[in-house]
Amino acid sequence: MPAAPHNSRRDVIIDAQEFASVLKPSAGWKTEWIQLRPGPVSHSAVRVAFGSDSYTALQTSSAGILRGSTAPGIRALIMGLPAATPLRTDARPVGSDTCLLLGPATPFDLYLPEGGGVMIFAVPAERESPATAISDEAQRRFSVLDARQVAQITQFLDALEQSRAIPAASKGETGSPRLLREQLRSTTVALFRELRSPEETRRAPLQRHVAVTRACAFIDGHLREPIALTDLCEAAGVGTRALEYGFHDFYDLGPMAYVRNLRLCRVRHDLLNPASKDESVSRAARRWSFTHMGQFSHDYRVLFGEMPSITLTRRALPGNQRATAAAGPVS
């Protein structure tokens, strides 16, 4: 398959909420990007929309978690980018020949390793036939693509690259955008119509993987409070070693590093929120349970490549001055 599609412009540094917004194929999606490795980070992205259908692809230079839920009334097919490091969900790899099918308003938790990327095909749920629709009892399921389906995606990506190589002024009504929309339509319709879940023996998840899910639920409910490793082990029902192994299986880092980075990302989101006109660095840091301002500033600079005060000053910049990697919908 061809190399992963990328933005025709140069890669740029974008803010966490801008990065997450790129991966909202339609209204109603919820997304959050949790950066896990030091930055600043370059991301490249492309989005193609046709009516209520959409295709979105993103590749990141650093590791992170894309977390959220699909929109009500929308079903999604999530795959790894060709030639990119496979992403993971629940410690299970998702590559360019496997996919994760999600029903409407269904949570997802995707770990993108360094150099990883994700593709999302999204269609209205009502389009699916009863034979292919995801039941309420199986809102998340995996499927394996056959050679013909992989070829369909290859053809679509080729068309996408050809379209992006044509200058905008040269794209007439009968030019590349129209052909690309038709390619998107045929690809998404075929994929959602023909995909079948492979027959496989359902295996119970490993205890340490169940523990990670429990620990993350505890963290979400107590992120603004002091959290110790013993608290996580108690909530997860496992010992320290099992929890450490589980988090490395999921996210390639330990549980307390995960807590720290999640808090730092929440602080960054608050600092960049234009609605918080009276926000300050210390207020945002304390809100997310940082008490040592010196250590907080150091950790923030290491993760994001800038001091929190610089992030706060950039909040007032016009949107076009805060770099975004989103390529607008093809019209």
Image (cartoon, rainbow, N blue to C red):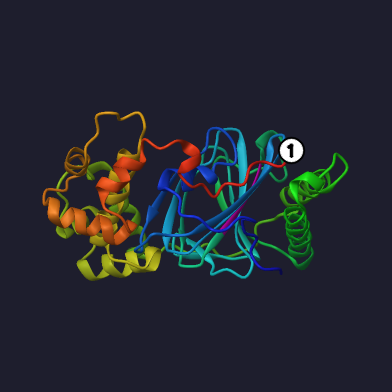
In the image, what residue occupies the spot 42% across and 47% down? 15
Nearer to me, 153 or 189: 153
Name the spot of residue 54 as percent of width and height, x first. 67, 43
In the image, what residue occupies the spot 54% across and 45% down? 22
Nearer to me, 284 or 225: 284
The quadrant in which the C terminus is found is top right
Mark 1: secondary structure: loop
In this image, 247 relative to 41: left or right? Answer: left
The secondary structure making up most of the magenta span is strand
Nearer to me, 85 or 219: 85
In this image, 172 relative to 310: left or right? Answer: right
Image height check: is 250 above or below 13?
below
Quadrant of the image occupied by residue 162 = bottom right
Q: Residue type at mark 1?
A: Ser
In this image, 273 relative to 203: left or right? Answer: left
For disc 1, the neighbor class at 10 Å (few under 14, some 14 to 19, many from 20) is few
In this image, 326 relative to 224: left or right? Answer: right
Q: Is residue 161 among the parts visible in the rendering? A: yes
Name the spot of residue 36 as percent of width and height, x first. 36, 60
Name the spot of residue 99 as percent of width and height, x first. 61, 58
| Residue at the outermost left position | 292
Name the spot of residue 117 as percent of width and height, x first. 55, 61
Q: Which residue is mark 1?
A: 331
Q: How many marks?
A: 1
The quadrant in which the N terminus is found is bottom right
| Residue at the outermost right position | 174
| Highlighted magenta segment, given as a residue range | 118-122
Quadrant of the image occupied by residue 254 = bottom left
Quadrant of the image occupied by residue 152 = bottom right
Q: Is residue 97 magenta?
A: no
Q: Is residue 119 magenta?
A: yes
